[in-house]
Image: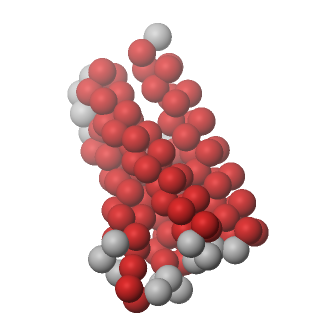
């Protein structure tokens, strides 16, 4: 069994989730059940699926959950982009979040490749 808390992917995705919760507090209340909810769910899906997969027996099973995490990261990347275009994020915060999500995606993809090779 793997300790998910030792992985940079989990640490980075947990920090990103906390940041998403923090920034969405400033979104319009009209987005509470739309964009805010979707962004938060996509964000916490990354570390939660990663940690669930880490508890699985085989690399193949772990990789399946990693792929789910990667899908959630792609989804969150779009929501970040949409938030900027709707005027909920300024350019500086957008760039920061975009860089963080892309770094995370690269790390997830790299680990997935290692598990399947």
| Quadrant of the rendered image containing residue 19 | bottom right
Residue found at the far front of this picture: 86
Does 98 appear above or below 68? below
Q: What residue is rendered at 64% in x and 44% in y?
A: 103
- Colour setup of the view: secondary structure
Q: Could you tell me which residue is drawn at 42 percent across and 64 percent down? A: 39
**101 and 5: which is toward the camera:** 101
Residue at the image point whose x is 52% and y is 30% from the top: 109
52 in relation to 61, above or below: below
Farthest-out residue, top? 117
Q: Is 90 positioned to the left or the right of 36 in the image? A: right
Foreground residue among 38 and 59:
38
Q: Quadrant of the N terminus?
A: top left
Q: Position of residue 36 (x, y in %)?
A: 40, 73
Residue 31 lies, in percent from the top left, at 39, 79
Outermost residue on the bottom side: it is 29
Decide: is 68 above or below 79.
above
Residue 108 point in image, percent of width and height: 51, 36
């Amino acid at each position: 069994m793997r300790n998910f808390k030792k992985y940079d992917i989990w640490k980075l995705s947990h920090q990103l989730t906390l940041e998403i919760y923090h920034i969405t507090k400033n979104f319009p209340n009209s987005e509470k059940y739309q964009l805010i909810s979707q962004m938060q769910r996509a964000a916490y899906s990354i570390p939660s699926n990663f940690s669930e997969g880490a508890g699985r027996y085989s690399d193949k099973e772990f990789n399946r959950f990693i792929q789910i995490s990667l899908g959630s990261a792609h989804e969150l990347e779009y929501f970040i982009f949409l938030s900027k275009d709707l005027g909920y994020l300024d350019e500086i915060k957008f760039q920061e979040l975009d860089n963080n999500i892309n770094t995370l995606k690269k790390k997830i993809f790299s680990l997935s490749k290692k598990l399947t090779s």
